[in-house]
Image: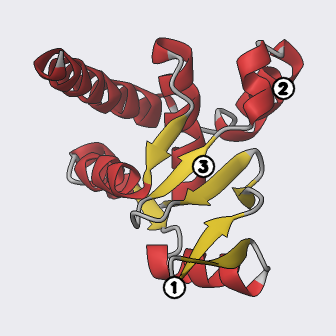
Amino acid sequence: MRDISEYKLLGYYLLKIYEKTGTDNLKYEQVKSLTEKLFKECVFKNYILLPIDSKKELIQKMISKGVFKTTIVNGKQTFSQIYNYEVSKYIYGVYSNDGSFTFKLPKEIKAKDTLLVQSIKKIYEANVGLDLQSAINAELNIYYKSNLQKNRSYA
C-alpha cells in the first residue's frame, strides 16, 4: 500500500486542467467529487488517501492567519480576503462571500512562465504512478466534457 496525499492529487488536477483548458482554479467541492470518483475505482485499492482538511478547517486556518479583513457596509459587517492563502506549495485558497472555497494556481502562471510550470510539474507529477495518472486523466476527460456541456447550455 502506498500513501497518496489529496494535495498532490489537487495539484495534479489543477495542472492538467490548466494545460487542457487554461482554467487555473477548481472549487473545493469539485476536488472532493473528483477524488471520490477516483477512489471508487479498483486502481486505488493500492493507495491510502491522505485527505485535505475540511473546508471549515481550512477557513479557520485562514482566519487565524489574518487573511480576512472586515468592513461595515450598510450596517452589516462583511469580510473580504486580503491575500491569497497558500494551502500547499503553488496552490492558493480563495474564499468568497458567497461561501465558495476555490483552489487556484499562482497568477504568474498566466504569463506562461515555463520555469514556474516546470517547478509545479516537478512537485505534483513526480512519483505519480502510471495507473494513477491514467485513472485521473480518464476522470478529468469526463469532467471536461460535462463542463463543456454546461457552458454550451448557458450560451
Q: Residue at x 84, y 26 (%)?
A: 116
Q: In the rendered image, which quarter contains the C terminus?
A: top left
Disc on res. 8: 3
Judge depth for marks 2 and 1 and give the one in front. Answer: 1
**Which of the two discs, 2 and 3, labels the residue nearer the N terminus?**
3
* Residue 137: quarter of image: top left
Judge depth for marks 3 and 1 and give the one in front. Answer: 1
Disc on res. 75: 1
Question: For the residues marked 2 and 3, what is the alpha-carbon distance in whole angstroms?
Answer: 17 Å
Question: For the residues marked 2 and 1, what is the alpha-carbon distance in whole angstroms?
Answer: 44 Å
Instruction: Reply above or below: 9 against 93.
Output: above
The answer to which of 131 and 82 lies nearer the viewer is 82
The answer to whether one can see residue 5 in this image is no
Amino acid type at circle 1 is Gly
The image position of residue 99, as x and y in percent, is: 40, 67
Judge depth for marks 2 and 3 and give the one in front. Answer: 2
The image position of residue 123, as x and y in percent, is: 75, 40
Instruction: Reply above or below: 58 against 90.
Output: below
Amino acid type at circle 2 is Leu
The answer to which of 119 and 155 lies nearer the viewer is 155
Question: For the residues marked 3 and 1, what is the alpha-carbon distance in whole angstroms?
Answer: 43 Å
Amino acid type at circle 3 is Lys
